[in-house]
Image (cartoon, rainbow, N blue to C red):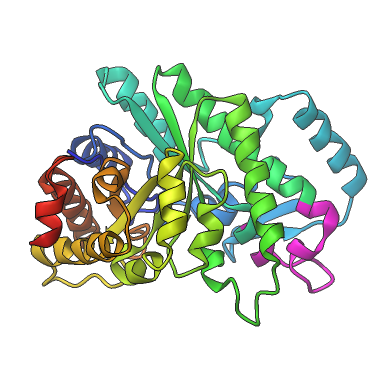
Amino acid sequence: MIKATGIGSVPHKDVKSICDLILDRFPDMPFWPQLFKVNPRENMFVQFAEALPCLEADLDRKTVRVVQTNQERELLTFYDYFDHNCYEYFKIGKDHARGFYALMEAIEKNGHPCVFIKGQVIGPITFLSTIIGDNGKALIHDDMMSDAIPKGLAMKAVWQAKEIEKAGKIPIIFFDEPYLSSFGSAFVPLERGKVVEMLNNVMSILTQKTRARVGIHCCGNTDWSMLLETKADIVSLDSYGFGEYFTLYPNQITKFLNRGGVVAWGVVPTAEYRASIDLKEIKKRLRICFNNLASRGVDTDRLLRHSLITPSCGTGLMREADATRVHNLTAELSADLPSAGSIEEWVQN
C-alpha cells in the first residue's frame, strides 16, 4: 500500500475528533492539524511568527507586522539563540498549535504504532514575499530579514522534528510554499538561484540537526524543475489540477527519483472539490500522470515506490463534512493502488 498523509489546515473545531480521524485514516503517517478556525493564532503566518525577530502578531487581520523598535536588540537575542542551537526558544506554543500537542499526546497515550509523523512550517519564500515592511516593500527585499526569518523558520522545523523524535518516530517536515505558484510572473521578480539557495539553506539546517525527511509543498503550478533540483526529499504538488504540467519534466523527475526523492501526489482535490467526485475519477487523474511519464521514459515502477498520496492542499476552507470526505478518499486511494511490480498493467488500463 502506498502511504498517505494530509497537508495541514482543517476546518474542524474539535481537536480530539480531528486527531482521532487523522490517526485512523493515516495510520502510517499522521499529520498534525492546523485549526485556524478555532484561533487566529493558527493562521499560517501568525502560527510560526513566535520568537521571530522584529515581528508582531496582528490577530485582527490574521497576519504579522514588522516592528521597528528595539530591532538591534531583538536581532542580537535571536542570533544568540540560533547560534547556540537553542531550538526550545523557537517552539510553537500550545495556543498556536493545539493540533500538534493533541496529536502527539494521543500517539503517546495510545502507543500508536506509526513510524512517521508529518509536520509543516510556512516556507521562507511565502513568508518573506507576503509580509510587508514599513517601507512598503515585501521582506524578501530586506537583506537583514531575509537572513534572519528563514533561519527562524528552519528552527521551528527543528523543534517539531525534535519533539517527534522524542516520541520515537521519524519526522517528515514540509515547508509550505504556496507563493511559488506565482514564480516566473511579472509580479514576482524572484531569481531562481535565490529561491533554490534559500530553500536549500532552511532544509540543510533541519537535516543537519535532526533525522527528519524534508518536503516542499506548492499547491499551484510552478517551475517544477526548480523544486526538483533542491535538496528536498519530497516534492508535493496539486496533481489533480496541475499534474500534467509536472509531467513535462521527465528528466528532472528521473534524477530526483534516482537520488531517492519522493513525489507526493495531491490528487484528491480541495479547491476543486465537488460532491460528485469519486475514487474512479481521482484514479483516472493519477493514471494520466503516470501514463505521461511512462511515455517520456520515466520508470513508473520506481515512481510508484517513491510516491505518497495526499489531498491537493489543506482542507481548512472546506466544510467539515467535505474535508472529512477528502481525507477518506485519500486513504481509500492509497489502499487501492497497485503494488510495485504491477504498475505497468495499471497504467495501461
Q: Residue at x 51, y 61 (%)?
A: 225
Q: Which residues are magenta?
A: 127-146
| Residue 307 vs residue 47, the one in the foreground | 307
Residue 251 is situated, as x and y percent measured from the top left of the image, at 44, 58
Asked whether, in this view, residue 302 is left or right of residue 230, the answer is left
Q: Residue pushed farthest front?
A: 297
Q: Residue at x 78, y 48 (%)?
A: 147
Residue 299 is situated, as x and y percent measured from the top left of the image, at 29, 50
Residue 206 is situated, as x and y percent measured from the top left of the image, at 60, 33
Residue 88 is situated, as x and y percent measured from the top left of the image, at 64, 26
Asked whether, in this view, residue 158 is left or right of residue 214, the answer is right
Looking at the figure, which quarter contains the C terminus? bottom left
Q: Is residue 88 magenta?
A: no
| Residue 37 vs residue 51, the one in the foreground | 51
Q: Residue at x 39, y 71 (%)?
A: 245
| Residue 160 vs residue 336, the one in the foreground | 336
Residue 105 visible? The answer is yes
Which of the 4 image quadrants contains residue 57?
Answer: bottom right
Against 339, is 162 above or below?
above
Q: Is residue 130 magenta?
A: yes
